[in-house]
Amino acid sequence: MSRAEHATKRDPSSPGHAHADYTGAVYGSMLAASVVIGAGGLGRFPRLQLVLLLLLTGLVFWVGHVHAQLFGARLAQRPLDRPTVLGVCREEWPIVEAAVPPAVAVAVSPLLGLDVEGAGWLALAVAVAGQVGWSAVGARKAGASWPLVTGTAAINLLLGLAIIAFKLALTH
């Protein structure tokens, strides 16, 4: 069952469960971290390029996820209508939203006195923090116990640290 189908089966009257799926935000944060890593391997370039790369990559992945949701299992099960399309677009939008904080970090990095490399590290830290934060918020809003919230945050931190380790290993 797809995330979109699962989301439509939730009981919206159940407190804390209607908006508990932060999968897109976690995924988008991990995607943003990967974009920063990949961009760092291309050498030095203007900050505006990294900001645009983050935002445009988020948009492309959002379109890809919307397409997969709409044209995967949905077409086999029922015809598409406007509310379904808009619902899937809204559900997948956190992928794009997760790219915004790292992009903002890059944009404000000159105010912090950071060079381009420092801007990349700041964006990477912001993306990993978002990944950890969204996983914890999503788990808590879904009603998970504090040990489970801590566990999912720790797993996402380890995944983020793995991305950072790859950056360090590949650039040194």
Image (cartoon, grey):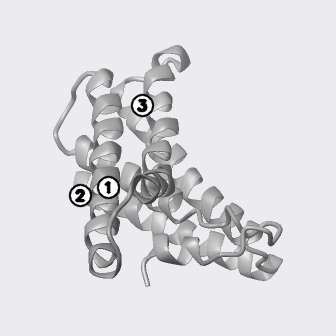
Residue 18 rendering spot, x and y as whole percentages: 70, 65
Which residue is found at the position 49% from the left and 47% from the top?
Answer: 98
- Residue 119 bears which disc, if any? 3
- Could you tell whether 26 is left or right of 116 in the image? right
- Within-10-Å neighbours for mark 1: few <14, some 14–19, many 20+: some
**Furthest-left residue in view?**
42
Near mark 2 (Cα within 10 A), the count class, few <14, some 14-19 or many ≥20, is few
Q: Is residue 172 in view?
A: no
Please provide percent x and percent y for residue 133: 65, 57
The quadrant holding residue 57 is: top left
User: Given contact means CB atoms under 8 Å apart, are the residues at marks 2 and 1 in contact?
Assistant: yes
Q: Secondary structure at mark 2?
A: helix
Spatial distance from mark 2 to mark 1, Cα to Cα?
A: 5 Å
Q: Counting residues from the N terminus, which is met first, the one under dot 2 or under dot 3?
A: 3
Q: Residue furthest top?
A: 111
Residue underneath mark 1: 167
Query: Residue 7 at x, y = what percent?
Result: 56, 71
In this view, the residue in front, 59 or 78, is 78
Q: Is residue 86 above or below residue 77?
A: above
